[in-house]
Image (tube, grey):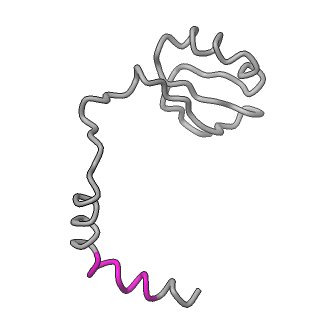
């Protein structure tokens, strides 16, 4: 049995009227179920701390890729032949 990460749940059928589901959840994440099986989560903006996430510049991304290139290169070489 899957343990849900939130007490708020809805079914795929209930998502026919998403605004009702979102209003009922009160800004909390919602587990989405289909045939009693978890298929995903809806996480509203209110539930995410957006102040700690800043977009990265192209230079920052390039610097991170350059630092990890040595470690990732064997994997990239392996995947090149696939």
Quadrant housing residue 23: top right
Rendered position, 30 above or below 41: above
Q: State the image coordinates of residue 35 (x, y, percent, origin top left).
A: 77, 33
Of 56 and 36, the residue lying toward us: 56
**Looking at the figure, which quarter contains the N terminus?**
top right
Rendered position, 78 above or below 19: below
Of 4 and 46, the residue lying toward us: 46
71 magenta-colored: yes
Boundaries of the magenta span: 69-77
Q: Position of 77 compared to 49: left or right?
A: right
Q: Position of 40 compared to 63: left or right?
A: right
Predominant SS of the magenta segment: helix
40 magenta-colored: no
**Looking at the figure, which quarter contains the C terminus?**
bottom right
Q: State the image coordinates of residue 80 (x, y, percent, origin top left).
A: 51, 86
Q: State the image coordinates of residue 34 (x, y, percent, origin top left).
A: 74, 33
Q: State the image coordinates of residue 24 (x, y, percent, origin top left).
A: 58, 9
Q: Residue at x 46, y 15 (%)?
A: 27
Quadrant housing residue 72: bottom left
């Amino acid at each position: 049995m899957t343990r849900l990460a939130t007490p708020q749940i809805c079914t795929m059928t209930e998502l026919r009227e998403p605004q009702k589901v979102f209003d009922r959840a009160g800004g909390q994440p919602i587990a989405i179920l289909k045939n009693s099986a978890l298929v995903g989560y809806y996480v509203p903006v209110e539930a995410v701390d957006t102040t700690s996430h800043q977009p990265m510049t192209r230079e920052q991304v390039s610097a991170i890729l350059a630092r990890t290139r040595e470690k990732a290169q064997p994997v990239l070489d392996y995947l090149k032949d696939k």
